Image (tube, grey):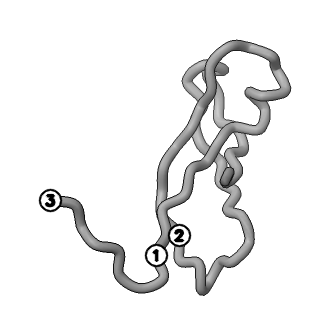
């Protein structure tokens, strides 16, 4: 059974910004959660991109 969401936590998808600019096929995406009360703006994290084989900036998409 899936857990019911409690409080202000929200599931978000992070997508690589450099991969879109490179023109290579495929995408690098991560799923995480954030507290929308503490961070109302878009989330930005440095994560590993397996296609580009390096750490890049991933931003929240919606």
Q: Is residue 22 above or below residue 35?
A: above
When asked about the image quadrant of residue 17, the answer is: top right
Task: Kindly indicate the quadrant of the structure image that contains residue 39.
Answer: bottom right
Give the total number of marks visible in the rendering. Answer: 3
What separation in Å lies between label 1 and label 3 (alpha carbons)? 18 Å
The residue where tag 2 is placed is: 34
Residue name at image x 61 percent, y 84 percent:
38
Would you name the residue on which mark 1 appears?
9
Q: Choose mark 3 or mark 2, whichever is in front.
A: 3
SS at mark 2?
strand
Position of residue 35 measured from the top left corner of the image (x, y, whole percent): 53, 77
Look at 68% across and 45% down and name the residue there: 58
Q: Is residue 54 left or right of residue 34?
A: right
Up-down relation of residue 49 to residue 57 (above or below): above
Which of pointers 3 and 2 lies earlier in the amino acid sequence? 3
Q: Position of residue 16 (x, y in %)?
A: 69, 37
Residue 62 — which label?
none
The N terminus lies in quadrant: bottom left
Q: Residues within 10 Å of mark 2 (few under 14, many from 20)?
A: some
Mark 1 / mark 3, whichever is N-terminal? 3
The front one of 56 and 39 is 39
Location of residue 44 with respect to 23 vertically, above or below: below
Q: Which residue is mark 3?
A: 1
Distance from the alpha carbon under mark 3 to that under mark 2? 22 Å
Residue in the image at 61% along x and 48% along y: 14
Task: Mark 3 and mark 2 in contact? Answer it, CB < 8 Å.
Answer: no
In contact (CB < 8 Å): disc 1 and disc 2: yes
Residues at discs 1 and 3 in contact (Cβ within 8 Å):
no
Tell me which residue sits at (82%, 20%) in the image: 22
Residue furthest to the left in view is 1
Neighbor class of circle 1 (other Cα within 10 Å; few <14, some 14-19, many 20+) is few
* Quarter occupied by the C terminus: bottom right
């Amino acid at each position: 059974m899936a857990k019911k969401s409690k409080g202000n936590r929200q599931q978000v998808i992070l997508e690589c910004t450099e991969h879109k600019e490179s023109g290579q096929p495929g995408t690098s995406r991560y799923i995480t959660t954030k507290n929308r009360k503490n961070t109302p703006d878009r989330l930005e994290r440095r994560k590993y991109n397996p296609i580009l084989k390096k750490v890049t900036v991933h931003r929240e998409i919606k």
